[in-house]
Amino acid sequence: MRVLLVAPPGAGKGTQGALIAAHFDLPHIASGELLRDHVARQTELGRAVQEHLDRGELVPDEIVLEMVREAFVVAKAAGGGYVLDGIPRNMAQARAAYLIGLELGMTANVALHLQADDSELVRRLLARAALERRSDDTEEVIRRRLAVYHEVTHPIVAWYAERGILVSVDAMRPAEQVGREILVALEVMRPLVDHVPEEARRPVDLTSLGVAFGAASSATPS
Ligand code: AP5
Ligand code: MG
């Protein structure tokens, strides 16, 4: 199973990525975590990217693509599956990650999109700020991260829909409920993904499930 997550800050990439990785025994490749680890260790790379992270701006594509390549090589040796969290972040990264995947025979077979409203995302990240110390969890930087998401990251969702590998879920509900829905969908898809060519697949939209089961409908999903 090769899953990548496309979702705004606070939607649950880390939370659900860890769940999927544990459930399917896959490496969880999280670009933000890898970058923050470099910053914490004050490596040369960490010093080069710190300011980008602190301001909520993307770090240069070459840096994350090199990370993807390295992580894919390790993942390939461990069986070839992965959960990619935080990459790709723009169209250039999406195309480049696809090419790296092609070269290594490990392109993503599910692009999981978590939808949530900006107001809920800000609320979650400010709540986290009270507990953890992430330099980018201030209201001003959270709003910048959301703006970057809407401007350059969200457009890649349509590309995955065209490729037929998109699965969209409503991430406004409690994390356990969202996680259960994701695992059920992935379990059902798992036997098929390696056998049904992308061009024969259709995007899977589970976002109305929350409303169907009584959750408030979201006016501005992202
Ligand atoms: P990154 O670390 O990826 O941060 P982000 O995208 O801003 O997202 P977060 O990690 O804040 O949120 P999440 O979606 O993982 O949600 P989580 O599960 O933690 O990137 C950080 C920075 O690194 C970027 O700004 C950029 O500078 C750089 N970067 C990274 N990748 C890059 C790339 N490819 N190219 C260029 N630059 C890159 O949940 C958030 C909180 O909400 C938690 O407290 C959680 O407990 C809670 N929560 C989760 N789900 C729910 C739920 N359903 N209900 C209620 N609470 C919930
Ligand atoms: Mg995260």
Image (tube, rainbow, N blue to C red):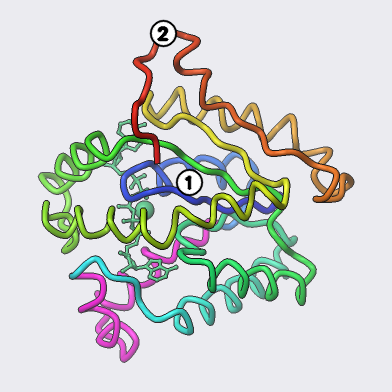
Q: Quadrant of residue 134?
A: bottom left
Which of the numbered marks, if any, corresponds to residue 214?
Answer: 2
Does residue 160 appear left or right of residue 120 in this picture? right
Q: Quadrant of residue 214?
A: top left
At x 37% / y 49%, what residue is drawn?
Answer: 8
Give the labeled residue for mark 1.
Answer: 18
In the depicted structure, whether residue 118 falls above or below residue 185: below
Instruction: State the image coordinates of residue 9 (x, y, percent, origin top left).
Output: 32, 50
Instruction: State the image coordinates of residue 157 (x, y, percent, origin top left).
Output: 54, 50
Q: Which of labels 2 and 1 is toward the front?
A: 2
Q: Secondary structure at mark 1?
A: helix
- Pick the residue in front: 126 or 208: 208
Q: Main secondary structure of the magenta part?
A: helix
Which residues lie in the magenta part?
Answer: 28-54
Ligand 1 contact, mark 1 (Cβ < 8 Å): yes
Name the kind of residue labelled 1 in the image: Ala
In the depicted structure, whether residue 85 falls above or below residue 184: below
Does residue 113 appear left or right of residue 82 in this picture? left
How many numbered callouts? 2
At x 30% / y 69%, what residue is drawn?
Answer: 36
